[in-house]
Each structure stands twice: as structure tokens, then as C-alpha cells.
Amino acid sequence: MKSILRGAAIVLAMMPIAATAQDKAKPEDTEQWSPAVPVVTPGKIDTALPPSDAIVLFDGTSLDHWQNVADGAPAGWTVAGGIVTVNKKAGNIETRQSFGSYQLHLEYRIPANITGSGQARGNSGLFLASTGPGDKGYELQILDSYRNNTYVNGQAGAIYKQYPPLANPVRKPGEWQAIDVVWNKPIFAPDGSVKTPAHVTAFLNGVLIQDHVALHGETLYIGKPSYTAYDRAPIKLQAHGDASAPISFRNIWVREIPDTEG
Ligand code: MG
């Protein structure tokens, strides 16, 4: 009995320490800085026009398929000249339609006059499933990673703070770049537990950057990722708050595919 009490006292004494350590979790805790990701010069690829069965999410003329995440109003980004440019005041935008698993194509351009460094240089993001407001969901990082050093699991093509890209095939600011993704959504049991984690395969400028990686959960800026059960979710694009010039997108389309279990 005495030893049980002593044990309980030790456990109680340790609890505040554990809680304090949790409170002090920092963004840096989940940054990975090495090994460096090899730089690859991509081959030349032409724009990939949508196949016949694609759902065209942005054809250069309107954002009818999109809405502001914050208020559900029509997406407040700027459409001109066949491209859409982030409006940081409008915040993140997401598709009106929700999706399970899919293949997606989009093209983005970091402005030629981009400024800033690290995470504050052309930061945006493709949220493969927008499971809530703000930045909630699963983020494939978009960033100017042309001679711009940052943590490797935060550079262009990373599954943010989970998987660095296998290669860095980015083009110079001012040039268009293509992302192609296969998103296998996570499968949840009725009790909300994970039956099959989400998997991501992705190409940047035609170069494999994510090879069917199993995600640990939703993206988190601070702390360890974890899952929240969902069925279908919108696709979201990030209006990051960094001070650099806003980036642009064009030619966004998606093809739904069957969910895969196991
Ligand atoms: Mg981002």
C-alpha cells in the first residue's frame, strides 16, 4: 500500500511537468532540415489540358467552383488574363464540391519579382482535403524553393512537416510549374479510428516528389499530426499571410477515383 501511494504521488508530481512540456511545443519541433533535397532541372512539359472526364475547377475564366473558406462567399481572388491570383485579404479559398479520392492537376507561378526568404517567399499550399476552417486539412506545400533555403519538410512539394519531397524540380520565379497529385483519402471505421491512412503520390514539373507516402494525419504547424474522421471534403488553396507578392494559378482540374482500402 505504501509503495502504491508513493507511486501515485510520483505520477501526480510528474503530471504538471508533462503538461508544461506540451504547452511549450514550438513550430521548430517538427521542422526537418536534413538531408538536403537534391535539385533536379525538370524537362520541358506543355500544359496538360483536362481529359474528357475531368471536373474543371478553373478554366481561366471564372471561380464559380470556389468560395472563400472564411465566409462561404464567392471566391475573392483575382481572375484576369486566364489566370487567378491570390488575394490575401480574401483568405483561403476552397471548392464548393467535396471529394473523396482523386487525381488532380494544377499549375502555379511564383511572381518574377518575388521577395522574402524561407517560408515567407511565395508561400501557398494545396490542401488535398479541407477538413475545416483556416489551414485545417492536409497540405502539399507550395513555396518558392528556387535557391531558397528552408526546412526540407516545408519546401515546395513537401507534405508539410511530414514528408520532404524526393527531389526539388522547381522552375525559376516567373515560370509556370505543374503539380499532379494522386490523393487516396484516409478511410475511417465507424468509430472514427483510422482503417487506412491517407496516401499521396505527387509529381512536380513531371518529376516524382512523393511516392505513395502514408500520412500521419492532418497538417499541423505546431505539434504532431493526427487524424479527424471525415468522408468527403473540399480542395483548398492557401492565401498565406507572408508579405511577398501573391502567386497565381491556372488550369486546375480533378478526376475522381475509387477509394482504396488496405
Ligand atoms: Mg503553405
Image (spheres, rainbow, N blue to C red):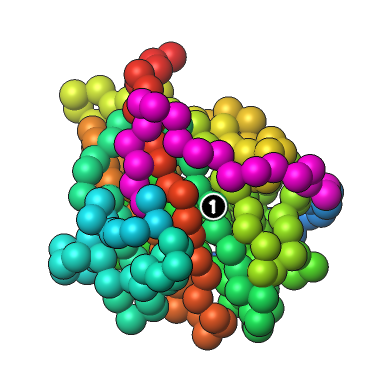
For this view, does 234 lie left or right of residue 171?
A: left
Q: Is 112 within the magenta?
A: no
Which residue is located at x 42 percent, y 65 percent? 84
Amino acid at circle 1: Glu
Q: Position of residue 78 (x, y in %)?
A: 36, 73
Residue 197 vertical placement versus 83 (above, below):
above
The reply to whether residue 44 is in sight is: yes
Furthest residue in direction front, as rendered: 81
> According to the image, label 1 marks what residue?
107
Residue at the spot x=61%, y=74% of the render?
111
Residue at x 64%, y 30% (from the top left corner): 211
**Left or right position of 43 against 139:** right
> If the image is split into quadrants, where does the N terminus sit?
top left
The residue closer to the viewer here, 212 or 7, is: 212
Visible residue check, residue 15: no
Q: Is residue 165 left or right of residue 254?
A: right
Residue 101 is situated, as x and y percent measured from the top left of the image, at 37, 29
Predominant secondary structure in magenta? loop
Q: What's the residue at 79%, 68% (across, down)?
A: 147
Between residue 12 and residue 193, name the one nearer to us.
Answer: 193
Q: Where's residue 21, x and y in %?
A: 48, 65
Is residue 188 or residue 155 the one in the foreground?
A: 155
User: Where does the magenta region start and end?
Assistant: 40-58
